[in-house]
Amino acid sequence: MNKFLLSAMLGLAVLILDPQKSVAQINVSLNIGSQPLWGPVGYNYVEYYYLPAIETYYHVPSRKYVYNINGRWVYVNVLPSRYRGYDLYSSYAVVINKPRPYLNHNSYKAKYVKYKNYKSPKNRIIRYSNDSRYYVIKGHPGNGNKSNSYKGKSPSNNKNGQYNRGKSNSSNKNKNYNNKGNDNRNKSGSNGPRRDERGRSN
């Protein structure tokens, strides 16, 4: 009992003496606002997405794609031209919360090759979610909607559902991505197969 009280007192002292550090530690574990509109719903934190269809990764904190070119993994703002027309909003994605997963690419490629042609349902994508947690994401239909009345309806045109060459992934008018994924920290009850980097079904 004495040890418990001592630990609690030390924790409280740290919070009082250095509140900014405590807040920073909390913020590190949450990055919903940085997740792309084409990402899967249900996760408070995502480090990387792996896209089996194009054997490419997406780093959420930097908002950059990571793909192999001539044997080197490079970070880029937009997908290369060979992926023109790739639909991120319907393609399968795997959430991997490990540093530089592409260094173990052969393992992830073999594990998730069966999802290369899998199409994810819209109800698992942030763009179409009516969960108010995602309203903070720029470009979401519920962003700035104080009444929180957005019902997850599909857009009237297909501009936001296509990869657009030359546009940065920070653009919110022509999102160059579409996709689904799974995070291993916060799981939701949505339908469809979900796997994290450990290969566990959700």
Image: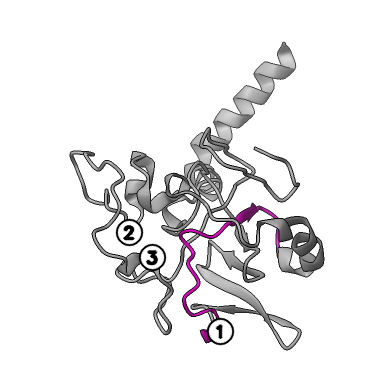
**Amino acid tagged 3:** Gly
Numbered range of the magenta stretch = 81-100
**Gap between marks 2 and 3, in whole Å?**
16 Å
Q: Residue 11 at x, y = what percent? A: 60, 30
For the residues labelled 1 and 2, the Cα–Cα distance comes to 27 Å
Q: Nearer the viewer, residue 189 or 170?
A: 189
Identify the mark nearer the N-term, 2 or 3. Answer: 2
Residue at point 69% right, 18% down? 4
Name the residue tied to disc 2: 138
Q: What's under tag 1, amino acid-wise?
A: Arg
Of the 4 image quadrants, the one containing the C terminus is: top right
Mark 3–mark 1 CB contact (< 8 Å): no
Q: Is residue 42 above or below residue 179?
A: above
Q: Quadrant of residue 14?
A: top right
Q: Is residue 8 left or right of residue 43?
A: right
Labels 2, 3: front one: 3
Location of residue 185 in the rendering, given as x and y in whole percent from the top left corner: 61, 41
Instruction: Give the position of the N terminus as an image quadrant.
Output: top right
Residue located 56% across and 32% down the image: 13
Mark linked to residue 82 = 1
Q: Main secondary structure of the magenta part?
A: loop
Residue 161 disc label? 3
